[in-house]
Image (cartoon, rainbow, N blue to C red):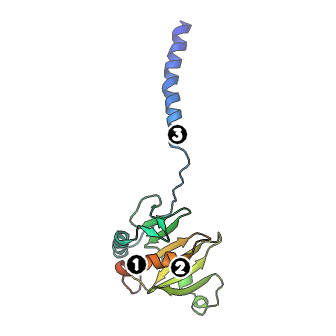
Amino acid sequence: MNVFRHRHTSVLGLPALVLLITAAGCSSADDSASTAVPSPDAKAGQLCRNLDKVLPAKVDGESREDPSPASALTAGWGDPAIILRCGVVRPPKMLDPKVAEGRDADAVAGGVNGVRWLMERQDDGAHRFTTALRRAYVEVTVPEGRDSSGVLIDLASAIKKAIPEGIAN
């Protein structure tokens, strides 16, 4: 009787062991980037989907590797990732008069290849760029140590093509 009980336990234990090994194999560290997906209104959302269709395969020499979760509103290139999010809300610094006057050490306005940007330095050394005077706000985060001008040059054509000039809501 003990043999039957012991055998029954080991038979039930085998599937549990296989499940545990499988789960451990599937839960290995994932090196892909992740980012929050914006929630724009319908008009900006359509512009962002149009942008996704014309984004370059390479930015600053890095191949496109979109972050998770997958969305037409986000894109990424390289590791550490250059992250683009389309349909973000207007950054508060965009309305700050100190930025427009050049008196903010952590934010500056400028333009690259016909696209105007607000550049904000992040605490981790990265730079966040948000388009200005376009019908939808596009945010690009460039990791510390990467040449941001190359990134913005590579993205300018797609942004001009998909996101018309104007004021976003």
- Where does label 3 land, which residue? 25
Q: Position of residue 2 (x, y in %)?
A: 56, 8
Residue 83 in sight: yes
Crowd tier of the residue under label 2, counting other residues whose Cα lies within 10 Å: few below 14, some 14–19, many 20 or above: few
Residue placed at 46% from the left, 73% from the top? 88
As helix, strand or loop, the secondary structure at mark 2 comes to: helix
Q: Tell me the kind of residue under disc 2.
A: Ser
* Contact? badges 1 and 2 (CB < 8 Å): no
Mark closer to the chain start, 3 or 2: 3
**Front position among marks 3 and 2:** 2
* 150 shown above or below 110: above
Residue denoted by label 1:
159
Q: Mark 2 — residue?
A: 149
Residue 42 position, x and y percent, is 34, 72
Q: Are marks 3 and 2 in contact (CB under 8 Å)?
A: no
Q: SS of the residue at dot 1?
A: helix
| Tag count | 3
Q: Quadrant of residue 37?
A: bottom left
Q: What's the CA distance linking mark 1 and mark 3?
A: 40 Å
Given residues 25 and 41, the one toward you in this image is 25
Q: Nearer the viewer, residue 80 or 43?
A: 80
Mark in the foreground, 1 or 2: 2
Q: Which of marks 3 and 1 precedes in the sequence?
A: 3
Taking the spot 58% from the left edge, 91% from the top edge, the residue there is: 97
Q: CA–CA distance between discs 1 and 2? A: 15 Å
